[in-house]
Image (cartoon, helix red, strand yellow):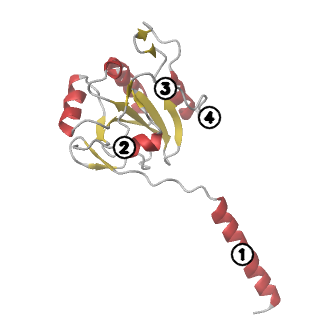
Amino acid sequence: MTCSNASILSKSVLFALFAIASMRFAEASPTVRDTKGEKRDPLGDRGQKATVLFFVMHDCPIANSYAPELARIAAEYTPRGIEFFAVYCAETPQEANAHLAEYRIPFTGLCDPKLQLARRAGATVVPEAAVFSRTGELLYRGRIDDRAVRFGAVRPEPRRRDLRLALDAVLAGRKVAPRFTTAVGCYLPADEPSNK
């Protein structure tokens, strides 16, 4: 090997190492089961413009009060390329299915007993929404709107519709700001439920 070839090879190796070091490795997309037992990859690329995970709980009154708004948001944004999932971390599939039917939540329910999706989103309470890009990047996490001020204090109408604003920004190709807001609701389990 000539010095010239060795120099080219060295530069190629250095360039490759630099490229590898500077790459952002995306986390593997968690696979969970839906409420019917089918495996789902909710954060996988299916050509959608974004994916919204709604963290819900069947016995949280604040989360349940948002069910009509979740349905309205899904009706407005699904035709525009946004996918929606309801994520249950503490419920059995039967409890989740009953909740979806009772509150007329019109999208697929996912069971997340190992909290894979909750951890990926950084979700800690319900109701909380997480918006992911087609490639699995977290674009927004937080409240649906500011109607719930704190436990026991709820405005008749929201002043700011944070999730809608985030989705509008995503669809317009803009950065979501603010990226995080604080949701008010019931806490998700801190650890995996032991008997689900």
> At label 4, which amino acid type do we have?
Lys
Residue 56 location in percent, x, y?
34, 30
Residue at mark 4 = 175
Q: CA distance from mark 2 to mark 1?
A: 42 Å
Residue 115: mark in rendering: 2
Question: Mark 2 packing: few (<14 Cα in 10 Å), some, or many (20+)?
Answer: many
Label 3: which secondary element? helix
Task: Please tell me which of labels 4 and 2 falls first in the chain.
Answer: 2
- Which residue appears farthest toward the bottom when viewing the image? 1
Can residue 48 be seen here? The reply is no
Towards the viewer: 95 or 6: 95
104 to the left or right of 178 = left
The C terminus lies in quadrant:
top left
Assess whether mark 3 and mark 2 are in contact (beta carbons under 8 angstroms): no
Residue 69 location in percent, x, y?
38, 20
Residue at point 36% right, 49% down? 41
Label 1: which secondary element? helix
In the image, is residue 29 above or below residue 58? Answer: below
Question: Mark 4 packing: few (<14 Cα in 10 Å), some, or many (20+)?
Answer: few
Task: Please tell me which of labels 2 and 1 falls first in the chain.
Answer: 1
> At label 3, which amino acid type do we have?
Leu
- Which residue appears farthest toward the top when viewing the image? 156
Residue 184 location in percent, x, y?
44, 21
Residue at mark 3 = 163
> At label 2, which amino acid type do we have?
Leu
